[in-house]
Image (tube, helix red, strand yellow):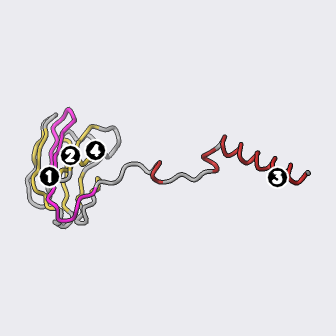
């Protein structure tokens, strides 16, 4: 009689403990808490980069492999057409004319567009470049 009763008591204690503290006893899946997927394009795909200046200051952007710096006024949006995803590690650099830090927010509004929104930030040194790797992955440095 005591063995089934003690087994039932132990089982009930474990059950109540697991209900009260599910984080300690149940393993979660990545699907529930892994965050958003990284932005990636198909290698070789032509990508349109949309740059938005959401700061109150003038920003300069430049593709180091061949363009002069382009000025972007506060609130202005610029579309850079046909950046080829097969170019070896294409990058864009950007900076605030007053030397203030920037935060780069990247998103993929549709299949062939990469949106780069530049916002002011107090974090130092801030973001300075967008890197499109030849395997289609996107990094911000």
Is label 2 in a helix, a strand or a loop?
Answer: strand
Name the N-terminal-most of marks 2 and 1.
1
Is label 1 in a helix, a strand or a loop?
Answer: strand
Which-is-in-front pick, marks 3 and 1?
Answer: 3
Residue at 23% x, 53% y: name it.
Answer: 130
Q: How many marks?
A: 4
Label 2, residues with CA under 10 Å away: few <14, some 14-19, many ≥20: many
**Badge 2 is on which residue?**
95
**Badge 4 is on which residue?**
105
Residue 41 lies, in percent from the top left, at: 23, 58
Is label 4 in a helix, a strand or a loop?
Answer: strand
Is label 3 in a helix, a strand or a loop?
Answer: helix
Q: CA distance from mark 2 to mark 3?
A: 68 Å
Residue 109 lies in the magenta-colored region: no
Which-is-in-front pick, marks 2 and 1?
Answer: 1
In the image, which disc is placed on residue 7? 3
Residue 112 lies, in percent from the top left, at: 17, 53
Q: Is residue 103 left or right of residue 79?
A: right
Residue at 11% x, 46% y: name it.
Answer: 79
Q: CA distance from mark 1 to mark 4?
A: 16 Å
Magenta-drawn segment: 40-61
**Badge 1 is on which residue?**
48
Viewer-proximal residue among 68 and 25: 25
User: Are the residues tagged 2 and 4 within 8 Å (C-beta)?
Assistant: no
Quarter-of-image position of residue 42:
bottom left
Which-is-in-front pick, marks 2 and 3?
Answer: 3
Name the N-terminal-most of marks 2 and 3.
3
Q: CA distance from mark 3 to mark 1?
A: 65 Å
Which-is-in-front pick, marks 1 and 4?
Answer: 1
User: Are the residues tagged 4 and 3 within 8 Å (C-beta)?
Assistant: no
Viewer-proximal residue among 105 and 124: 105
């Amino acid at each position: 009689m005591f063995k089934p009763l003690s087994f039932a008591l132990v089982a009930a204690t474990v059950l109540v403990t697991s209900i009260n503290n599910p984080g300690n006893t149940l393993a979660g899946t990545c699907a529930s808490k892994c965050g958003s997927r990284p932005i990636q394009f198909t290698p070789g795909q032509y990508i349109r980069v949309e740059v938005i200046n959401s700061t109150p200051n003038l920003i300069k952007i430049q593709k180091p492999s061949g363009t002069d710096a382009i000025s972007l006024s506060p609130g202005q949006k610029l579309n850079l057409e046909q950046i080829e995803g097969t170019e070896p590690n294409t990058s864009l650099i950007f900076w605030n004319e007053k030397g203030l830090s920037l935060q780069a927010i990247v998103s993929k509004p549709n299949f062939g567009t990469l949106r780069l929104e530049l916002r002011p930030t107090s974090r130092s040194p801030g973001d300075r470049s967008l890197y499109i790797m030849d395997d289609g992955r996107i990094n911000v440095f």
